Image: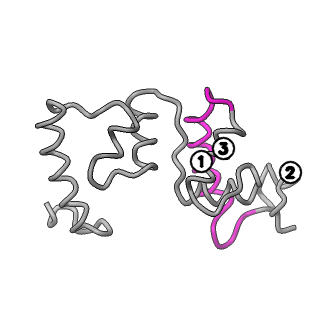
Amino acid sequence: LEEKIRTCGLYRSKAKNILANCAILCEKYHGEVPQTFDELVKLPGVGRKTANVLVSILFDTPAIAVDTHVFRVSNRLQLAEGKTPLEVEKGLQKAIPQEWWSRAHHWLIWHGRRVCKARKPLCDNCFLADLCPSCQK
């Protein structure tokens, strides 16, 4: 498996976790992916972000996964400020109505990738520039 995923970062630990998860899913869950956040985070290599993505995408459960883009954009906009992804996740859950969580997660990722870039944000092209406390005018 390591050879197949060698181009991924941390491929050795990922391969180990994938194989461990395959065994757990077969033995404990009869080949099915668990549907709850709490069960997912018990799996090797599955953290909050991955569990939130899975419950949101696979099981249509409202969730906000905080990746680097969501973290950066949320802090820059002061939509949800925090020093950790968990702080930002909790802040976003308060700031955004639950029925919009999963969609907002994707919007924030898109905005972070395309406009509010890490090193050189494109504030001149941002439709949120007038509202953004971090806008570099």
Residue 120, placed above or below residue 102: below
Q: Is-magenta flag for residue 110?
A: yes
Q: Is-magenta flag for residue 121?
A: yes
Residue 60 at x, y percent in the picture:
45, 27
User: Total number of numbered labels?
Assistant: 3
For marks 1 and 2 on the same chain, the one whose residue lies earlier in the sequence = 1
Q: Which residue is mark 3?
A: 92
Q: Range of the magenta residues?
A: 97-122
Answer with left or right where residue 48 lies relative to residue 41.
right
Q: Residues within 10 Å of mark 2 (few under 14, many from 20)?
A: few
Q: Are marks 1 and 3 in contact (CB under 8 Å)?
A: yes
Q: Which mark is residue 131?
A: 2
Q: Main secondary structure of the magenta part?
A: helix
Q: Which residue is mark 1?
A: 89
- Where, quadrant-wise, is the N terminus in this rendering? bottom left
The amino acid on which the numbered mark 2 sits, given as a three-letter code, is: Leu
Q: Residue at x 82, y 55 (%)?
A: 132
Q: Are marks 2 and 3 in contact (CB under 8 Å)?
A: no
Q: CA distance from mark 1 to mark 2?
A: 21 Å
Answer with left or right where residue 119 lies relative to residue 52.
right
- Where, quadrant-wise, is the C terminus in this rendering? bottom right
Nearer the observer: mark 2 or 3; the answer is 3
Q: Are marks 1 and 2 in contact (CB under 8 Å)?
A: no
Residue 51 at x, y percent in the picture:
40, 43
Q: CA distance from mark 1 to mark 3?
A: 5 Å
The amino acid on which the numbered mark 1 sits, given as a three-letter code, is: Glu
